[in-house]
Image (cartoon, rainbow, N blue to C red):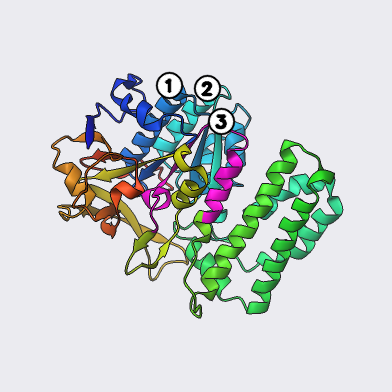
Amino acid sequence: MSIYPLRTLDPEDEDFSDLEPLREIVGDARVVAIGESAHKVHEFFQLRHRVTRFLVRELGFTAVALESGFPEGLAVDDWVRGGPGDLDALLHDGITYRFGRCEEARGQLEWMRSLNGQVHFYGMDVPGSSATTVPAIEACLPLLDDVDPAYAKVIRDQLLPLFDYLPADRSGRLWVVPALQAYMALDAAHRHEITARVSALAERLQAMRIVYGADDQADVGIRCAATARHMDGFLNAMADGATRTYPAANIRDAAMAENVEWILQREDRVIIGAHNGHIQREPLWAPPIINDKMTTLGGHLAASLGPDLVVIGSAFGGGTLQSHRMLPDGPPGNAELYTVDVGPLEPDTIDAVLAAAGLPLHLTDLRTAPASAATKIMNGAQSQPIDPAASFDALVYIDSVTPWHAFATA
């Protein structure tokens, strides 16, 4: 097992000599996935940013695709490539799950814009922070207004009003909770009408591809419609969960994989940023929360890309994580922040094994590593079962982590 000390996580430090081992690990792969053990962690944002700079500057990568809504990311890409727009608004609305509401995300987008169109930004995830299909449907309307205005009217008059059930207040950190609760409370006929109309939208746009024209607007609109269908399928599976008699399917990760494969039709080499649990090649299994082994984004891409995929996960030795919890007496979707101190770690985690190297920051090449006693990896403050070498090509170990530098409204 080859272990390489790393000097820094500072993305402004562009002495990339310590990252040179990545040149051989990545090779000619078209996709490099960079994972994080937990969201909203300062050091994991910095790691992704610095490795991204290396991959762009030294290896010619041309796009960054994040665990964020596909349709929402279109405006971010326009700004990154020099277009107009307000960065604060884009960080608020263009990156979903509230992942853009921090100084770390601001710094990476500002750097991407400074490259004058060299790098594209994509969201690869389902829309609406996995709570609503509406952003994907609305993203189809500019195309339809131009080339199919009669059908655009149908969407506005017959499909979008079906989402009137959504809560108007989205200011709370957990606004997705009342949004999902409202969906689950719909009667079956209402849900099925949404599904039928979203499916009709996606099928019509695909069937009209030649009529609409082979330009970028049509290509993006058709992809947004497909993403709307994926999101509706994700919600339907959730509603069916209580009575389902067959194993669950990970529709969200399948949707992300399909979006990445679409991106690869447009880009030479792509960097993916997401949670370890999405990029790992092995199925995700985290009992008692996730009791069925779920095919991941990494599993789908490994099947389609083979050696063109390299997966770099993260591990850590302890520190402080930030989370949130519902306020029982507060308005729906409101939550309070709190922190969790993590450590010491269980000895059978790969995190603990890497800590034993005695280096505060290092990169480990797992491709030729001997069998390890590690059977788990830290997923936030909890451990989950995993075969590290089957899931990742390499791991970056960080000895201690801290919360992200969030904006006041995050």
- Which kind of residue does numbered mark 2 sit on? Leu
| Sequence-wise first label, 1 or 2 | 1
Q: Which residue is mark 1?
A: 58
Q: Dot 3: within a 10 Å radius of its alpha carbon, few (fewer than 14), some, or many (20 or more) residues?
A: some
Residues marked 1 and 2 touching at CB (< 8 Å): no
* Crowd tier of the residue under label 2, counting other residues whose Cα lies within 10 Å: few below 14, some 14–19, many 20 or above: few
Name the amino acid type tagged 3. Answer: Asp
**Regarding mark 3 in the picture, which secondary structure is present there?**
loop
Residue furthest right in the image: 150
Give the mark, 2 or 3, whose residue is nearer the N terminus: 2
Q: Residue at x 66, y 65 (%)?
A: 163
Single out the mark in the foreground, 1 or 2. Answer: 1
Residue wearing tag 2 = 115
Q: Real-space Cα distance between discs 2 and 3?
A: 17 Å
Observer-nearest of 365 and 343? 365
Residue 144 as seen in the image, left or right of residue 313: right
Residue that numbered label 3 is attached to: 268
